[in-house]
Image (cartoon, rainbow, N blue to C red):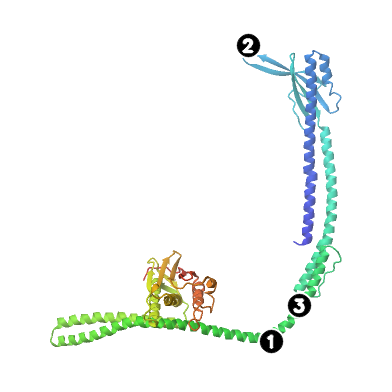
């Protein structure tokens, strides 16, 4: 809907509303007012005649009764005037009575209206009772409504004429508004379309001194400024084009550098993990070696027993050998699992989600991180508390990525309590708490330490890439940034921190359930 149509609709609406008022509402209200006043006037006349009749009857002046009734005979609006007499008849026991009205006197004498006559569209009938010691009754007065109807017709004709005048004025105003507002605005719109298509020669011709004329002048100034600015931008684009290739090369170099830094962060965490893995893998290897030596001794004994023909003892020794072989196999698989985990951590993630026992994963990497710290500092000890929710089943995640996040949080926690231990010595007991919770639609992993905490001024920076509080050479500043991306972008979860400087730091991971099953 264009502006011209809106202007005409507005003018038409105003004219129609005014016409409705002048043609319907105003005449209707005037007719009601005239009719109400006319009713009051007729009732007043009926009351006046009734009062005169009452006075005349009380004074036994019957000529006065005639005079009172003739008070309205000369009124051209009079249709009839009747004097009714009310008779009261009691029953024989004088316990009840009935009243009847009969026509006592009327004018004109051939009055066709009965004592029960009521008002209609042609006549207004009013009743005024009177009562004296000699007679009781009522005056019934009827007046024609011709005067009222004539006045209403005149009002409607006047309203129709006024509506016609307003309609003509509305048409004139509509044409004037269209000429002075719509046409200049449409010209401005057309010029704006040409400018949007790149034609900066478009101008608006409007010599009026009103706001629309000022708008046209401002538009012309704007187009001139745009033309000049466009020419400058074209020259600037030529300059930018010459440096675009250089910027592309720089971006490519930055991307390569970033990939190298990410790989460096992964290798740094792998280095910290290696010491813990070495400690973990040593136990199953010791078991394998010990049981292998024992089996060699048992085999020699079994050979001797077979040579002596003692098959029962040989079978017993064979059973012991089988049991030891099962232990060797179990611990060999344990060592194999640890080596595979290290290899998976060192290479790029597959990005494939699979069901994982989060409790087992959290516990395994907690021990690996702790042994890694202990490998660097044999004197270091910490109190480790775990509270794993047994209701947590398997959850579909990318195992390598979640393991990398847990390892990073554990390493940061151990680093914090180790630094605080260096400051407080024996007055401080390092504690790390790892908790998991089943929140129905998601699981929560909390890693809390009572170390140095995080200063409030850097709370909003800890998840930024390359931000670190560690000394130069001890951290890339990518650990928490990568962890945040893995949890939020890779798994649709959340990673937040609660901390108080000098007291504690708690990192909370939330991961939504994809597949919820029984614990392995």
Q: Residues within 10 Å of mark 1 (few under 14, many from 20)?
A: few
Q: Can residue 199 be seen by looking at this rendering?
A: no
Residue wearing tag 1: 242
The alpha-carbon separation of the residues under discs 3 and 2 comes to 117 Å
Q: Nearer the viewer, residue 165 or 118?
A: 165
Residue wearing tag 3: 229
**Earlier sequence position, callout 2 versus callout 1:** 2
Residue 340 position, x and y percent, is 39, 82
User: Where, quadrant-wise, is the N terminus in this rendering?
Assistant: bottom right
Q: Can residue 162 be seen by looking at this rendering?
A: yes
**Earlier sequence position, callout 3 versus callout 2:** 2
Q: Residue at x 21, y 86 (%)?
A: 297
Tell me which corner region of the image, top left, top right, bottom left or bottom right, holds residue 464: bottom right
**Earlier sequence position, callout 1 versus callout 3:** 3
User: Which structural element holds mark 3?
Assistant: helix
Tell me which corner region of the image, top left, top right, bottom left or bottom right, holds residue 353: bottom left
**Relative to residue 217, is residue 297 drawn left or right?**
left
User: Where, quadrant-wise, is the C terminus in this rendering?
Assistant: bottom left
Q: Residues within 10 Å of mark 3 (few under 14, many from 20)?
A: few
The alpha-carbon separation of the residues under discs 2 and 1 comes to 130 Å
Please tell me whether mark 2 or mark 1 is closer to you in this view. 1
User: Which structural element holds mark 2?
Assistant: loop
Residue wearing tag 2: 92
Q: Nearer the viewer, residue 226 or 461?
A: 461
Q: Is residue 44 above or below residue 365?
A: above
Residue 266 position, x and y percent, is 47, 82
């Amino acid at each position: 809907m264009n502006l011209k149509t809106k202007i005409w609709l507005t003018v038409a609406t105003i004219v129609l509303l005014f016409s409705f008022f002048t043609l319907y509402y105003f005449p209707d209200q005037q007719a009601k007012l005239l009719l109400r006043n006319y009713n009051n006037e007729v009732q007043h006349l009926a009351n006046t005649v009734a009062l005169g009749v009452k006075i005349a009857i009380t004074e036994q002046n019957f000529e006065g009764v005639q005079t009172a009734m003739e008070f309205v005979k000369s009124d051209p609006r009079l249709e009839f005037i009747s004097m009714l007499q009310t008779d009261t008849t009691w029953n024989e026991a004088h316990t009840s009575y009935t009243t009847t009205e009969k026509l006592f006197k009327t004018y004109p004498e051939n009055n066709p209206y009965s004592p029960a006559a009521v008002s209609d569209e042609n006549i207004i009938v009013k009743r005024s009772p009177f009562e004296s010691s000699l007679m009781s009754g009522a005056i019934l007065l009827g007046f024609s409504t011709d005067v009222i109807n004539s006045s209403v017709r005149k009002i409607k004709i006047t309203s129709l004429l006024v509506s016609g005048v307003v309609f003509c004025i509305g048409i004139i105003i509509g044409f004037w508004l269209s000429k002075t507002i719509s046409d200049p605005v449409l010209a401005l719109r057309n010029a704006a379309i040409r400018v949007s298509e790149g034609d900066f020669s478009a101008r608006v011709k409007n010599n009026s001194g009103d706001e629309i004329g000022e708008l046209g002048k401002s538009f012309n100034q704007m187009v001139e400024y745009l033309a000049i600015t466009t020419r400058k931008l074209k020259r600037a684009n030529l300059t930018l084009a010459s440096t675009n290739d250089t910027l592309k090369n720089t971006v490519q170099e930055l991307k390569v550098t970033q990939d190298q830094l990410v790989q460096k962060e992964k290798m740094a965490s792998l280095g910290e993990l290696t010491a813990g893995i070495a400690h973990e893998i040593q136990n199953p290897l010791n078991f394998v070696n010990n049981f292998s030596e024992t089996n060699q001794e048992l085999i020699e004994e079994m050979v001797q027993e077979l040579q002596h023909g003692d098959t029962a003892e040989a079978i017993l020794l064979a059973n012991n050998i089988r049991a030891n072989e099962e232990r060797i196999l179990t611990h060999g698989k344990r060592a194999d699992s640890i080596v595979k985990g290290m290899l998976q951590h060192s290479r790029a993630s597959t990005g494939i989600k699979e069901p994982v026992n989060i409790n087992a994963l959290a516990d395994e990497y907690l021990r690996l991180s702790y042994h890694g710290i202990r490998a660097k500092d044999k004197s270091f000890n910490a109190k480790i508390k775990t509270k794993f929710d047994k209701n947590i089943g398997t959850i579909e995640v990318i195992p390598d990525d979640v393991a990398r996040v847990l390892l990073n949080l554990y390493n940061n926690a151990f680093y914090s309590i180790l630094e605080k231990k260096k400051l407080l010595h024996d007055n401080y007991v390092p504690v790390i708490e790892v908790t998991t919770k089943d929140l129905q639609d998601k699981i929560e992993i909390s890693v809390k330490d009572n170390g140095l905490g995080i200063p409030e001024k850097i709370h909003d920076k800890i998840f930024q890439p390359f931000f670190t509080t560690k000394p130069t050479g001890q951290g890339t500043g990518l650990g928490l940034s990568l962890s945040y991306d893995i949890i939020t972008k890779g798994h649709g979860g959340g990673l937040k921190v609660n901390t108080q400087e000098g007291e504690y730091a708690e990192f909370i991971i939330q991961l939504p359930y994809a597949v919820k099953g029984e614990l392995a």
